[in-house]
Amino acid sequence: MMKTNPFNRRDALIALAAAAGAVALPAFAQPVTKAIFGYTAVTDFASVFIAREEGYFTKRSLDIEPKLIPLNPSIPPAIQSDSLQLGGPTPSVFLQAVEGGLDHVVLTGGGATSKSMTGIGLVAKAGANIKTAQDCIGKKIGVPGLGAFLHVGFRAWLKTQGVDSTKVTFIEASFPQHGDLLRGGSLDAVVTADPFMSRIVSSGTGYVASYYSTFLPDGLPTLVFTARRDWVQKNPAAAKAFQAAIAESAVFINNPKNAAKVREHIGKYIKLPPEVLATVQLSPPLPVVQEKQLAWWSDQMLEQKLLKARPNLAALIVK
């Protein structure tokens, strides 16, 4: 009978024990990936706030630090310079950055458009007598980022109403400035979003002239959560973990039992009192971004001459 080589058997047992030990290692023993995530003061970043506060990042060995950025178009340059490793530009800002030479990719999405959403609108200064798209001609209108989501979507709406958007003067202004700029008379109207829109209206500074965003198709990403391609290539496990954490956050948001917690977490990061947040309409989460969803934005931007050519959209999304 053939004898078993004791050394081979011993080596096999050692290897088996090592493998079992590796499987049993707790999550906190794994290397932690740190990253700074750039966000603007809107509720569509809820999934990031929840993933941090509910521990969805931590349990996946991620240390994601949210950092407030005043203007959305500032996010891609900050990612490129490594001041941020992750961030949430609007789809249009992202696509412009890519065409400009930045090799960035989409990991997940933030919020999604919905025809039932009235948390976005054209808010006119009290007494401005702006009621229709035609009334916007010759007016100064503030947007929270030239070429960003609200700007591109509003220009698309103007076209559907027969208005040439080049006859409107658009001025870049961050969300927190909107009320003061209307009150001071620097702007005739703003394209804004809750919770800022609700505060402007409740204060009497302005009124909603149009919930223009209700014309947009359902299910379009309002934000895309992005990173440099080389960061994803160097940190593939962290990238997958980020996607999984955002997906878990979406489940949390969709559970009606968590409604109060969702608003509590949002309030921590965009610094609004509970009574204000209680009235804000939240957009549905969109953890997975598909090529056809980016294509709508790309087509609008080509028509508005914000892009020179349609990019290879499939290559811009991390599966």
Image (tube, rainbow, N blue to C red):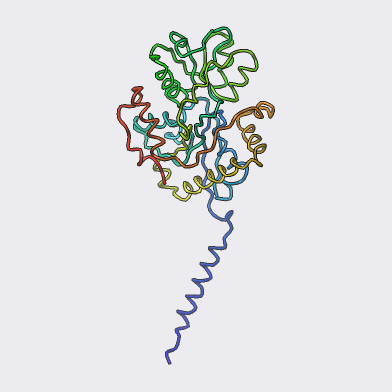
Left or right: where 258 falls relative to 42:
right
Residue reaching furthest bottom?
1
48 lies above or below 205 = below
Q: Is residue 132 visible?
A: yes
Quadrant into which the N terminus falls: bottom left
Q: Which of the 4 quarters of the picture holds residue 4?
A: bottom left
User: In terms of depth relative to the viewer, which is nearer, 14 or 290?
Assistant: 290
Q: In the rendering, at what x and y percent does residue 34 appear?
A: 52, 44
Left or right: where 227 falls relative to 21: left
Q: Residue 276's x, y, as percent?
A: 66, 26
Q: Nearer the viewer, residue 167 or 129?
A: 129
Vertical relation: 29 (above or below) 67: below
Say whether residue 291 is left or right of residue 122: left
Q: Residue at x 59, y 40 (%)?
A: 253
Which of the pair 16/114 is nearer the observer? 114
Can the viewer see residue 165?
no
Left or right: residue 204 compared with residue 8: right
